[in-house]
Image: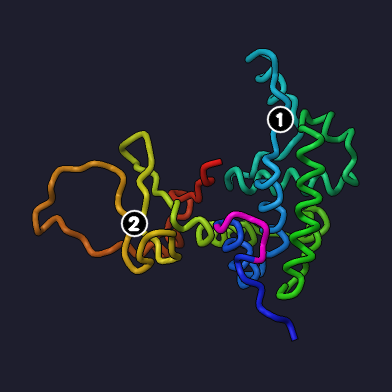
Amino acid sequence: MKRYVGVEELPLEPSLSRTLIEANDLGCLSQALTVAATLSAEITFHQARSKGKERKRKQLSSLPDGSGWGDHIQLLQIYENWDLAGYDPDWCADNDLQKRSMMFSEDVRKQLSQIIQKIAKGPTEVQSSSRHKRNEHDYEKLRRALCVGYGNQLAERMLHHNGYRTLGYSGGSHGSNGSEPTEDKTRSPPASDKDVKQPVDVDSKIQAAPERYLARKGKR
């Protein structure tokens, strides 16, 4: 009988721990483990000495770009490519990735897989897209798990402004009542009675327009 693994047992920040637990229920645990490992290792490129070299590197790079699904999916795809390359350190050098951070992400992923194996509802090994059929629904499930994990940092893109607005989210955040929406960080003039709206149903809004929402990284 598999026992319950709590958030506190995972050696991660709470947001990533919640993401893994939600991903396990949604059937995308393998992908979430990879994202959690790469975020923990803070995968970075070698810094170019000039902007010209940086532009040239991006033009010549064969690394995936996330397929329009955002930075988290790009990190997933990069790690999967490294898996296909047999975790070759030379592959990191060829793609201007820091070898130490990539190798650290591999170690973190192995450790997380061992811990969460007790409750895993699906495979935990790397499911590279070239080896397993994958469709957009798989990425949708992963992004939904990230939105649950980073619920207290969920933000909506403001269409007519250059920025984002934080949203209340029932997933729970430290220091506030989970049933109440998070305080809006943007300033606005006092509203009249007719301007007052009902609390936002965040889950429905994410499903209706996922491209307008993102789970932002926590402060490092």
Between disc 1 and disc 2, whose residue precedes? 1
Specify few, some or many for label 2: CA neighbours under 10 Å numbering under 14, 14-19, or 20 or more. Answer: many
Query: What is the secondary structure assignment of the residue under circle 1?
Result: loop
Mark 1 near mark 2, Cβ–Cβ under 8 Å? no
Specify few, some or many for label 1: CA neighbours under 10 Å numbering under 14, 14-19, or 20 or more. Answer: some
What amino acid does circle 1 point to? Phe
What amino acid does circle 2 point to? Thr
- Please indicate whether residue 152 sits to the left or right of residue 30 in the image: left
In the rendered image, the quadrant that contains the C terminus is top right
State the image coordinates of residue 127 (x, y, percent, origin top left): 78, 59
- Kindly indicate the quadrant of the structure image that contains residue 160: top left
Q: Is residue 118 above or below residue 218?
A: below
Query: What is the secondary structure assignment of the residue under circle 2?
Result: loop
- Dominant secondary-structure state across the stretch colored magenta: loop
In the rendered image, the quadrant that contains the N terminus is bottom right
State the image coordinates of residue 162 (x, y, percent, origin top left): 36, 34
Q: Which mark is residue 146?
A: none
- Kindly indicate the quadrant of the structure image that contains residue 208: bottom left
**Mark 1 or 2: the one toward you:** 2
Q: State how far apart marks 1 and 2 are (Cα).
A: 35 Å
- Please indicate whether residue 128 sits to the left or right of residue 137 in the image: right
Residue 13 magenta-highlighted: yes
What's the magenta region? 9-14
The residue pinned by badge 1 equals 45
**Residue situated in front as seen by the camera: 197 or 9:** 9
At a point 68% along the width and 44% down the height, the residue shown is 75
At a point 39% along the width and 59% down the height, the residue shown is 175
At a point 46% along the width and 62% down the height, the residue shown is 207
The residue pinned by badge 2 equals 182
Q: Is residue 150 above or below residue 86?
A: below
- Please indicate whether residue 1 sits to the left or right of residue 176 in the image: right
